[in-house]
Image (cartoon, coloured by chain):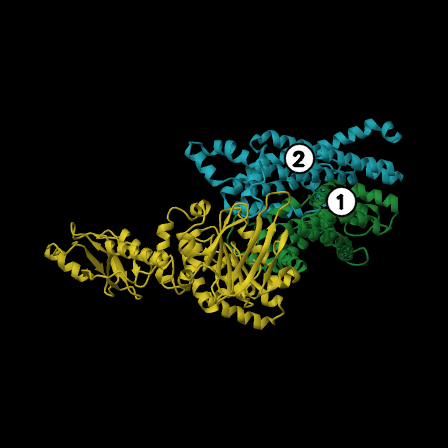
Chain colours: A green, B yellow, C cyan
Amino acid sequence: MSVPALVEEYSSDNPLVQGYEWLMNPMHWQGPEGIPLRALEHLGYTALTLSIAVAIAVPIGLYVGHTGRGRVVVISLAGVLRALPTLGMLTLFVLLAGLGLMPPIWALVLLAVPPILAGTYAGISAVSKDTVDAARSMGMTEPQILFRVEVPNGLPVILGGFRAGVLQVVATVAVVAYINLGGLGRFLIDGLSVSDYGRVLGGAVVIAALAICLDIVLAGIQRLAVSPGLKAPRRQRGDSPTGRETITAGVQGGNS
Amino acid sequence: MAVSDARISLPDSGTSTPQVDAASAAPAAGSGTRPMIEFNSITKRYLENQPAVENLSMTIDKGAITVFVGPSGCGKTTSLRMINRMVEPTSGTITVDGKDVSTIPAASLRRSMGYVMQSAGLLPHRTVTDNVATVLRLNKVPRAQARHRAEELLDVVGLSARMGKRYPSQLSGGQQQRVGVARALAADPPVLLMDEPFSAVDPVVRAELQQELLRLQRDLAKTIVFVTHDIDEATVLGDKVAVFATGGRLAQYAAAEEILRAPVDDFVANFVGRDRGFRHLAFSTADSVPIHPVRTATESERGQRSAQQSRPPSDAAGWVLAVDDAHRPLGWISPADGSALLPGGSLFHEGQTLRRALDAVLSSPAGLGVAVDDAGSVTGVVKAPEVLAAIENARRQREGGL
Amino acid sequence: MAWLVANFSEVLSLAGLHLYQSVVPLLISVLIAVPLAQLARMNKTLRGLLLSAGSILYTVPSLALFVILPVILGTRILDMANVMVALVIYAVALLLRSTLDALESVDDGIRQAAVAMGYKPFMRFLTVDLPLSVPVLFAGLRVVSVSNISLVSVGALLGIGSLGSLFTDGLKRDFVTEIVIGIIGTLLLALLMDAFLVLAQRLLTPWLRNDGGLTKATAESNSDDEPAVVSA
């Protein structure tokens, strides 16, 4: 697709210096192949993937968490999905369905579904049975119990799963550049192909910065969205400075 | 809260709570009571197992406290939960105020009854006020109005308004239970279902909450069904007590006094326990026990005495009761050792039951039960032989009455 | 199928490389994470620092880390070491937290009892704390093992050999079979590793083997009116 611009001129052979110079070059911060637009593309793919994954995983997670039905199926399915190599699915979908936006997006959806599904399911089913029983005894209908009691109380874990999903997708969107899509991964793949390590390193730093910023924003949202009643003293153990819940460690399937 | 000052002398039964009258009335349903809840041949069976509740038929009086009591697995909670359809019976019908509950949609049926559970079951993500307002909000009461009512209710159950802003995890167990009761009362339901509401709090708080419930009930006159495994709690609270046996059988259903006095079978006798004779004393007032004057000494008087190094003049027993300036009891001074202050026993409030009187006598180092008035000032002492005579008297009266 | 038969030895050697690149980081990360977790438990500042650093490193995308590491380590970009060091970083970040949770989940009464019996701190850690935290530690290891095996294939984008090479090669040659075999191979490796870890945990925690009976008993004594006396 895009023909890389002319080969960069660097003042040094040291890749660190090259990366710094590449990042500081104002030419790379403008135009259709500049960092801001690539970052927007990157976020766009991420948002598209997550919308689809949420639309699939959240209803299933809510259903399974609330009713307890299909628990085993969902857990084992999430396990298998997690073990699927995303690069493999990416190449497979492209070969089967051709180039274009959607085949790689579907491969990314497969990656995002397990943490979101597991987080939603775990969040809902971790709500104390007594609390649910009390809600029912007060005359809440099942949808009211789900949305007014179970979701707000499971929110820390649900959002933890969502955060894990976002991280994985942001990381893996970098890989889709390999099959001719945009996003920040372009800098890595194109830079490698012409041995422009300044661009590779600069691009990597931008991707890492984007992922870290996004995670911080999500952590902030998580903090605001969760009822203060769920963070009240009581148990101090396992309180992490970053606010990431213990359970998410099990929910996460690593980066890719 | 109103009863906190009565901590050392929490009565096993209120001074003259209505249950005494109800208890002394004939055990058969009196003419004044109306049925509110009726179980008609209710059986509940889980899967293939033996029934949790078997062929239960009983009538629960309107405006009274009915206690379901029994060991684990006796079906008392299951029976309670069938009233608001948290559990559906396998066969039989339950009517509330004449209506078959199975014809009322479960959610609206539950909104029409208050429910208090062992763990309080407060919603952790909502403030105390919003917890209390939950049912009102479900009934589409405007938010401001619901909150206002919730704040009133916090006051009713003895919590300050500023508690309303807190979250459940910031409250003590006793406070949580109070919020649970306030929440159940919010929609002013005629029926209150209480599932072991006080069993998770410590004994002192539990006794407080029991007294508070009796106080509330005097004003509200709800139909309360109360589940507990504690026979003491059952006899303190219950106008009528239903003893359930393992396997879901209703073993005895009668006034608390009668359960203690005349258990129908070995199961009930065993369950009520070895102390049932003693517990039964809680149903007779000790008005007939004479109160005798006692030698008292304030702190300054005691100081003088030790300064004089003189032994106290020996009266009948030689014991002197140390009191503070408001004449409240501090402890006993033994005739053998005039300087040491021995801690006193339980206190007997005037107008309380024979059980309290006897306990005051037995727990006192002097063998004299200290009687106090409502303000806590010493009015005199009761003596063991006279308490025993009163007990014997009460028994004779009961026999004569039967 | 015919392709697999013809190229079996090559697929097998790629699988071997794949396994090597995922297992070695797993082992190294345990050796790093467990002592770090113990240190973090003793010092609150260190604990906050390590956990923050861990979660930031965990956020860095793998492809980015794969290309940044050679610059920092001075390795060549095609070196397997880059992938392995990156995987160690992710694994330590994840294991640190779960090991910390595991160590903290050890009942303080048990720890006190060990002290009372005269255990010195290091012996107590090795013989009491560590064994009791094995179940949680292994739960973390299983997550790491699956994610490692999936991540190793990304190295193929840089030309580092693994089952991932079948994906890049298959795409280049427009050959679906090769990709499918790569995917199945990766799944099999993940499954194999998981089975191995489950087995290892069972061997290491003989006291948990009859846990079925224990949890059942507590579940039954839980509720009052649930069909209580079901068993027998």
Using the rendered image of the protein, determine whether residue B201 is visible from the camera's viewpoint.
yes
A177 or B217: which is nearer to us?
B217
Q: Secondary structure at mark 1?
A: helix
Image spot of residue B392 (x, y percent): 29, 54
What kind of residue is marked 1?
Tyr
B25 or B64: which is nearer to us?
B25
User: If the image is split into quadrants, where does the N terminus of chain B sit?
Assistant: bottom left
User: If the image is split into quadrants, where does the C terminus of chain B sit?
Assistant: bottom left
The chain holding disc 1 is A
Front tag of 2 and 1: 2
Q: Secondary structure at mark 2?
A: helix
Q: Which mark is residue A88?
A: none
Image spot of residue B40 (x, y percent): 59, 56
Crowding at mark 1 (Cα within 10 Å: few <14, some 14-19, many 20+): many
The chain holding disc 2 is C
A100 or B265: which is nearer to us?
B265
Image spot of residue A107 (x, y percent): 79, 47
Image spot of residue C100 (x, y percent): 56, 42
Q: Name the residue carrying label 2.
A: C25
On screen, residue B392 versus residue B34, left or right, reads: left
Using the rendered image of the protein, determine whether residue A163 is visible from the camera's viewpoint.
no
What kind of residue is marked 2?
Pro
On screen, residue A40 versus residue C225, left or right, reads: right
Mark 2 to mark 1: distance in Å?
A: 26 Å
Q: Name the residue carrying label 1.
A: A197
